[in-house]
Image (spheres, rainbow, N blue to C red):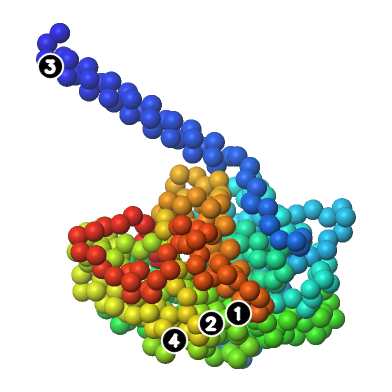
Amino acid sequence: MSPVSSSQGRSWRARVLSVVATLRQQVHAWSQARRAVELPTPTGPFTVGRSAVDLVDLARPEPFAPQPGRGRELSAWLWYPAVPEPDAGPGAYLPGAWWRSAPFWGFRAKRVRAHAVPEARVAGVGAPHPVLVFSPAGFPPPFYTALFEELASHGYVVAAVSHTYEMLPVSVFADGRVRWFRPASVGGALQVSHAPYADDVRSRAEVVEVKAEDLRNVVDRLARLGVESGRFSGALDLERLGVLGHSMGGNAAAEHCARDARCRAVAILDGGLWTAVARSGVARPVLEVFGEHPEYVQPCGESVRRGMFNSEEYCRADQRHVVRGWQRVFREGRPGYSLQIHGAGHASFTDCAMLPLRGWSPARMALGTIDGRRMLRVLAECLRAFFDRHVKDLPAPLLDDPARVFPEVESAPPEVLFAVRPGEAPPGQLSP
């Protein structure tokens, strides 16, 4: 055989092997998308219930509706310690019209099994229960089900706010109404910006202010639920209130906690800070939990080359603003804790790494390398230690040295975790 024909043969075999590898990947993705997935069983002593409540603040105009002027309407989804009826079973992972979120994120909702029992009776043991109010950003509240079920099984009531018009692709009320996503509700945070950096800070701060007011509305509504007749009468202890949030929801949680004396502690999960707390901090116990962010540790030229920013000038402004805000909140916390979970991407703080996602799911763009179930265990234990100590007033030795139990966790000030390392481009995902 001539050298030319030998080369052609190798090229042909390489093409065949490439096609076979691609087919195998497609078959694997197809099988993953069709398999049933049960979320991790909660480890606490309580069975978990789930309910929802709608509310409206007529004094606040709806800022994102196609026709402004209507009152701001919200829904809050509650996970709580429960005593269900003997024949009661878990509800759907995405109840009601929330199923519409699944095709957008690339999975079939019916293939996911959760553990919470809809409308179950609230457990009397330990009541009234401490309350944690949660603000998401883009991801619907049910996409944090595994974390909320875990916290609720250990005696917390978790109230997750559905910020209307912000959930991707749809917000769903307890009464079944839906509101489709509107881009103004995220302040341009889902794409690489070409606006001046100061304009982006301003637009995102405006969004966070709306979210922080949503949290105030929900806390006020929970306070009324706790004294009104009904399922939650006498069950909610607003004297033991913690607030947490993911992404821009973390900023909303911090802003709310700085303003509301009822908040005893706040946890910020992988979220930038755009409002006044970035300059003043929060004079309460604060926990910041980060994933990996190459855009804050690699040179700006590399970040621009990888499409994370439109210019090095914008990149440097973002690095200064975001990292300084994190550092300020850490320093002003009373006390402040700062943790990074290595291998975590922005979407790792949700259920997404445990869901049967198709290969084209947008969530895959923001998932890190850490296994989803391991991420849940690390995050849930760190959050529970923080709120146990600062909301329940219980001992929580894990909080003092989490790396002793979880080697994925690094405890250090944000300015250390996100010091620019020239010439280095570490793994991780860009957060929206």
Residue placed at 51% from the left, 71% from the top?
400
In the rendered image, which residue does mark 3 sit on? 4
Percent x, y of residue 169:
53, 62
Q: Quadrant of the C terminus?
A: bottom left
Tell me: 145 left or right of 206: right
Relative height, residue 176 to residue 72 (above, below): above
Question: Is disc 4 placed on a helix, strand or loop?
Answer: helix
Question: In the image, what residue type sits under mark 1?
Answer: His
Query: Which of pointers 1 and 4 lies earlier in the amino acid sequence?
Result: 4
Query: Which of pointers 2 and 4 lies earlier in the amino acid sequence?
Result: 2
Question: In the image, what residue type sits under mark 3?
Answer: Val
- Is residue 103 visible in the rendered image? The answer is no
In the rendered image, which residue does mark 2 sit on? 285
Question: Is disc 2 placed on a helix, strand or loop?
Answer: loop
- Say which mark, if any, is on residue 332: 4
Relative height, residue 220 to residue 129 (above, below): below
Residue toward you, 411 or 132: 411
